[in-house]
Image (cartoon, rainbow, N blue to C red):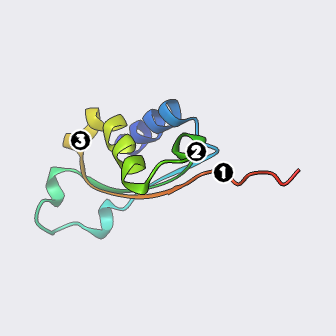
Amino acid sequence: MIKAKIQEILAKTFSPDFLEVIDESHKHSGHAGASQGGHYQVIIVSKSFEGKKLLEAHRMIYKALEPLKSSIHALAIKINVPLKSKN
């Protein structure tokens, strides 16, 4: 359910060319804090990040996902911008 919400929020906010949300919670069961929320990986390609520093782009994602912060324990993020056509 949280994975779908993450995907929905990021799709609405950033209109990505590519978006993948991976639930990695099963890899972390049993460690401290794991019961407080899930572990997710986000791979996103969006023009929204063009010209942004990596830290700024990460902050944009964290801000978008603020309503879910109590459900997310860890978030790994991979960001890219679309390749420009050479035409």
**Which residue does the numbered mark 1 point to in the structure image?**
82
Q: Earlier in the sequence, mark 3 or mark 1?
A: 3
Name which residue lies at 31% across and 69% down.
27
Asked if the residue at tag 2 contacts the one at tag 1, i.e. Cβ–Cβ closer than 8 Å, the answer is yes
SS assignment at label 1: loop
SS assignment at label 3: helix
State whether residue 12 is above or below residue 6.
Answer: above
Pointer 2: residues within 10 angstroms few (<14), some, or many (20+)?
A: some
Left or right: residue 58 compared with residue 37: right
SS assignment at label 2: loop
State whether residue 4 is above or below residue 36.
Answer: above
Asked if the residue at tag 1 contacts the one at tag 3, i.e. Cβ–Cβ closer than 8 Å, the answer is no
**Which residue does the numbered mark 2 point to in the structure image?**
46
Task: Residue 26: give x, y in percent of width and height.
Answer: 31, 64
Q: Residue type at mark 1? A: Pro
Name which residue lies at 27% across and 36% down.
66
State whether residue 45 is above or below residue 64.
Answer: below
Task: Residue 10: give x, y in percent of width and height.
Answer: 46, 38
Label 3, label 1: how far apart the Cα atoms are: 28 Å
Residue in the foreground of this view, choosing between 53 and 83: 53
Q: Earlier in the sequence, mark 3 or mark 2?
A: 2
Name which residue lies at 32% across and 37% down.
63
Task: Residue 17: give x, y in percent of width and height.
Answer: 64, 44
**Which residue does the numbered mark 3 point to in the structure image?**
69
Q: Residue type at mark 2? A: Ser
Task: Residue 62: give x, y in percent of width and height.
Answer: 32, 43
Left or right: residue 52 compared with residue 24: right
Task: Indicate which label's residue lies in the foreground, 3 or 1.
Answer: 1
The quadrant in which residue 48 appears is top right
Q: Residue type at mark 3? A: Lys
